Image (spheres, rainbow, N blue to C red):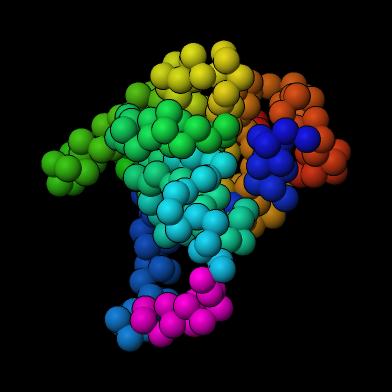
Amino acid sequence: MSRFQKIARGALATALIWSSLLLTAQADSNVKAPISLGELLSQNSKYLHSHGAEYYADFKDAQNPGVTLLSCSDSRAHSTSFFNDPINRVFAVRNIGNQIHNNFGSVDYGVHHLYTPLLLVMGHTHCGAVQAAMQNYASESFAIVREVDHLAIPLRGILQEASQPHDAELLWARAVEHNVDYQVEMARRRYADAIAAGKLNVVGAVSDISNAYGAGYGQLVIVNLNGEKDLTRLRLHRLVADVPEALRQQAIRRLKP
């Protein structure tokens, strides 16, 4: 079993639309609790006592991750949904909307300096950045506008659909998937040489926190493998050849157009 296949298997084993966003934000604010420095230090103390010097011995002088993860900064989408302990396993690059344009340098470091065999582009359902790009976000700060601008490109087709009667939840989820596809394509163009040499595979995934794909809340859904988006071919792809059939059916999915 190749290093990538082991990683992939582990990873497989995380208007109406505007009103929906407001309701989500309101729900979040109702359960939000303040986090004090005391709590942070207390949690760190527990961590410290459960991880001794031997835990750090193999990587305290150099990191050796197997995955470069490009994901959204959203607090609900973390690599801990598919790795119990991501330390020294995941080189994480995060920004709003999991956009490669905004962090080319960081992703380059993972691919060209750490030589991770897998670049995992992970979006998530109910992504606020994607939703903002589907609306008029001109009133946001200049910095936010600049970051969201790149999302408008992959969502042009979705924006046309938004002017017609539609299912707001499904449209939002499809926009997230479209964005993942776009970021994968940009990565394939940038790292074409590494991909051609067999040194890198680019995988698009969605952390489904709303069960939009029907596989369960929190399912890491694989939607794109090196640019392949056809569902039948995805489930037969060489990169998931060693994944049990039941797991392939559960975790490899695409939303219907």
Q: Position of residue 22 (x, y in %)?
A: 36, 58
Which residue is the extreme one toward the left? 142
Residue 176 in view of the camera: no
Q: Is residue 184 above or below residue 209?
A: above
Q: Position of residue 93 (x, y in %)?
A: 40, 44
The picture quadrant where one finds residue 252 is top right
| In the foreground, 172 or 66 | 66
Residue 252 in magenta?
A: no
Drawn side of residue 92 relative to residue 13, left or right: left
The picture quadrant where one finds residue 242 is top right
Q: Is residue 81 above or below residue 155?
A: below
Which residue is at a point 20% across and 39% down the rendered structure image? 145
Q: Magenta stretch mostly in which secondary structure?
A: helix
| In the foreground, 87 or 234 | 87
Residue 52 in magenta?
A: yes
Quadrant that contains the N terminus: top right
Drawn side of residue 59 relative to residue 34, left or right: right
Q: Is residue 197 above or below residue 11?
A: above
Which residue is at a point 54% across and 56% down the rendered structure image? 58
Residue 26 in view of the camera: yes
Which residue is at a point 43% across and 54% down the rendered structure image? 61
Q: Position of residue 251 (x, y in %)?
A: 72, 43
Q: Position of residue 25 (x, y in %)?
A: 37, 62
Q: Is residue 43 above or below residue 129?
A: below
Which residue is at a point 33% across and 86% down the rendered structure image? 38
The picture quadrant where one finds residue 148 is top left
Magenta range = 40-53
Drawn side of residue 38 relative to residue 12, left or right: left
